[in-house]
Amino acid sequence: MPISSTHIFVQTTGGTDIVDLTPQIQMQVKKSPVKNGAVTLFIPGSTASLTTIEFESGAVSDLKNAIGKIAPEDGHYDHNERWGDGNGYAHVRAAMMGPSLHVPIVEGKMTLGTWQQIVLLDFDNRPRDRSIVVQISGE
């Protein structure tokens, strides 16, 4: 079973930046010889996560607002007390959302829904250079 690994690089702006990764991942799947299998995505780091959403301004705004209510930036975080970097909320948000996704590939295409895109959520309080691991396996 062939397995290929690569990276997608994204520069974020900080402050709950949400970036559509779907076109870059689709390109990697298309270049792969895998017709039936899966693509696994992983974001190294403790202040970013991956998920899916309909990537349109209303849904993106709703997601940002919901995350802000669950782990507000101005809340008390022991991490901030210990390290003084002010991104305790980013660590909590990323831990709740998770660092990885697994998407089946059928007949050479990801099995995403019509309005479903893969997105990177960078919660850190400063711009970051992010590297997303893309691993494709199958037959």
Image (cartoon, rainbow, N blue to C red):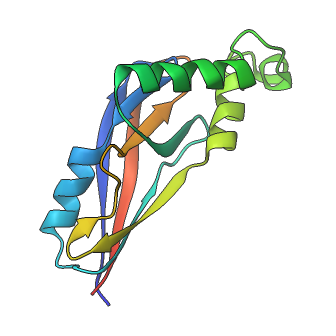
When the figure is inspected, residue 48 is found, relative to residue 128, above or below; the finding is: below
Rendered residue at 59%/34% (across/down): 47
Residue 82 figure quarter = top right
In the image, is residue 78 above or below residue 98? Answer: above
Residue at left offset 36%, top offset 46%: 116
Q: Residue furthest top?
A: 74
Quadrant where the image shows the C terminus: bottom left
On the question of residue 71 being in view, the answer is no
Picture coordinates of residue 44, whole percent (x, y)? 51, 48
Residue 109 visible in the current orientation: yes
Q: Is residue 43 left or right of residue 8?
A: right
Left or right, residue 104 beside residue 96: left
Q: Position of residue 111 (x, y in %)?
A: 33, 63
Total numbered badges shown on the rendered structure: 0
| The N terminus sits in image quarter | bottom left
**Extreme residue in the front direction:** 114
Q: Is residue 118 above or below residue 82?
A: below
Q: Position of residue 93 (x, y in %)?
A: 66, 32
Camera-side residue of 76 and 126: 76
Which residue lies most toward the bottom here? 1
> What x and y, as percent, mark residue 122?
49, 30
